[in-house]
Image (cartoon, rainbow, N blue to C red):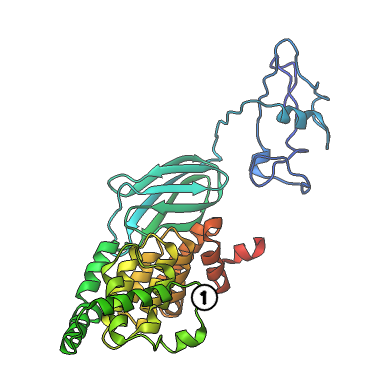
Amino acid sequence: MGDPGSHGRPSNGCGENFPLDDTGEEIEENPANSSHEQPDRRVELFFFDKDLGILPPPPGLNSPPRGQEYPEWRRRVRETHEFGGEDVGTSSVTVLNRDTNQPIANAQVSISGPSSLAAQTDATGIAQFSTIRPGSYQLEAHAPRFANSATNVLITSGANAQTVLMTRVPTLEIMLLLCSHCGSCSSSRAAGSQRQDATAMPDSNELRAETDRLQEALNQDDISPLVLDAGFKDYSAASKNALVERAARGFAPAPSAKLLARLLFIRTPDNEPAMRAAYVANLRSSEDRARAHSLYGLQKLGHDKLADLALLSLRDTADPVVSAAITILLPQTKSDARLHDFLSSLYLARRSDPAFHASTSLLEANGFVTSSDKGTR
């Protein structure tokens, strides 16, 4: 590092015997011989207390292998400032709508790796990052009404450019509007109502009481499988239809997860349209398992907008709902590359979040794990 007297300041050579690890932050415990990594060609300035001087004192012009002085200097550091030279990178990240190729403004973009930085895209969909330490990073983008995107990128010294494609997800209100106009709900339900009108059974006190008893039975903690398989044969079709209508309209308290999970056992030709409407309505339930059972119910009923509703539910904050959506969508990933990529991005974004353990485990069990993940897990 030079003659200690030539600059009036003590100097000490350390890089050869104390190379840094891949993070550039810590000393490599078992360094390889003849290493020529750029982080080891560094200059570090240590400022010591004026009165106490350099402690511990330098051993000479160079720190010997496994010497204690240099590591102790690093341990005692209270504040660090880095001054980047040529070995830093910059990155320009362009965020686009996957379907229209148009820029997405105000998207939140972050990179995590040797450095952690965040920025927001401008009107042209571009987010700029400067002074990035080279290495492997995870690049994530978030924007309202778009599915989160995550990918791995390599940042090198100098200028870098990345493009992120984000998939727009329709809002729940749009999906409910679509559902209200699809043949499986509105027209079929109208036909079912006409059939019920034709067989007109008055909404008597007796019917209401029977419907209340049926609702209470479906909400029990334990129900015999024989009773479920028999479809609650002791109850009239009219009470079953009335209860499904209640669930479709919504009532206080809202339908429980248990009731929604068992609703299929009281299905009749007349109440199936209302049952579809009940499950769609309860995708907005405050109970996460009610939302999950509503998805499974729509799957059993063969709802023609099921894939769209499941895709929308991937943005849910509850693991059971996301797991249900993934279960529904998995068969389509074999023929839909975009959906496969979307679920891969979801896995990358949530794999380290314990709140989504079940859904990420489900994705792992179905092969949504990168080769690098397999080596580290």
Q: In the image, what residue type sits under mark 1?
A: Asp
Q: Quadrant of residue 324?
A: bottom left
Residue 61 in the figure: left or right of residue 358: right
- Between residues 344 and 170, which one lies in front from this camera angle? 170
The reply to whether residue 328 is visible in this rendering is: yes
- The percent position of residue 359, horizontal first and vertical second, equals 51, 66
- Between residues 293 and 98, which one lies in front from this camera angle? 293
Callout 1: SS: loop
- The percent position of residue 108, horizontal first and vertical second, equals 39, 47
Q: Quadrant of the C terminus?
A: bottom right
Q: Residue furthest top?
A: 51
Q: Quadrant of residue 194?
A: bottom left
Q: Residue furthest front?
A: 206
What residue is shown at x 48% (from left), y 66% (from top)?
320
Task: Please give the residue where the numbered disc 1 appears in the rendered image.
Answer: 222
372 relative to 85, above or below = below
The reply to whether residue 337 is visible in this rendering is: no
